[in-house]
Amino acid sequence: MSGDIQYTIQQINSESPLYPLAVDLRHRLFFRDLGLPKQVVLDQKEAASLHYAMSLGETLVAYGRLSETGKLEMQVSQMVVAPNFQRLGHGEKLLKHLVEQAEAKGVKMLHLAARLHAVPLYKKLGFKSVGEEYTSTLTNVVHIKMIREVL
């Protein structure tokens, strides 16, 4: 008998019970402390994006989304891990899943805007920094563009 805890990664949509939890988590970790309203999470990419949640039962552990940005090109965005699940490898597992999903769709390039503390995670999975660091006009947080090309 295995004592392993079983985490599930699944694609979700706005009807999923995990979706409002994902909106809340993204707002809480990315925007709330900046005084930004919850609606900021629901940007112009939200409706057309593919949403992925890692859960433990009904508990949301991590979230990430994929958005089509061009022919055979997608963006990874709003990757977030719940505070009590951070530094346990969940972000890496979810990111691997997002990369696999994008590649299964024939995507040749993934890109993202990484907060500087997350750069090592993305590099571990084949993303490379491009260009200079910049400050987000929405959050005033420093980011750098990263890409991962599929050969």
Image (cartoon, grey):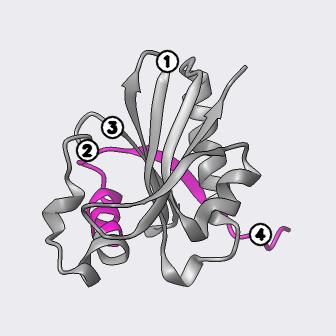
Single out the residue that lies furthest toward the front. Answer: 132
Which class describes the residues within 10 Å of circle 4: few (<14), some (14-19), or many (20+)? few
Q: Which residue does the numbered mark 2 point to in the structure image?
A: 46
Figure quadrant of residue 8: bottom right
Residue at point 48% right, 75% down? Answer: 82
Q: Amino acid at mark 2?
A: Glu
Q: Is residue 79 left or right of residue 13?
A: right
| Tags 3 and 2 touching, CB below 8 Å | yes
The mark total stands at 4
> Sequence-wise, which precedes: disc 4 or disc 3?
4
Secondary structure of the residue carrying numbered label 1? loop
Secondary structure of the residue carrying numbered label 3? loop
Which span is picked out in magenta?
1-26
| Mark sitting on residue 4 | 4
| Tags 1 and 4 touching, CB below 8 Å | no
Along the line of sight, the residue nearer the viewer: 5 or 126:
126
1 vs 3, front mark: 1
Residue at point 39% right, 70% down? Answer: 141
- Mark 2 vs mark 4, CA separation in Å: 34 Å
Secondary structure of the residue carrying numbered label 4? loop
Q: Which residue does the numbered mark 1 point to in the structure image?
A: 72
* Percent position of residue 128, x then y: 67, 44
Q: Amino acid at mark 4?
A: Asp
Q: Is residue 151 above or below residue 74?
A: above
Q: Is residue 22 above or below residue 44?
A: below
Q: Which residue does the numbered mark 3 point to in the structure image?
A: 49
Secondary structure of the residue carrying numbered label 2? loop
> Sequence-wise, which precedes: disc 1 or disc 4?
4
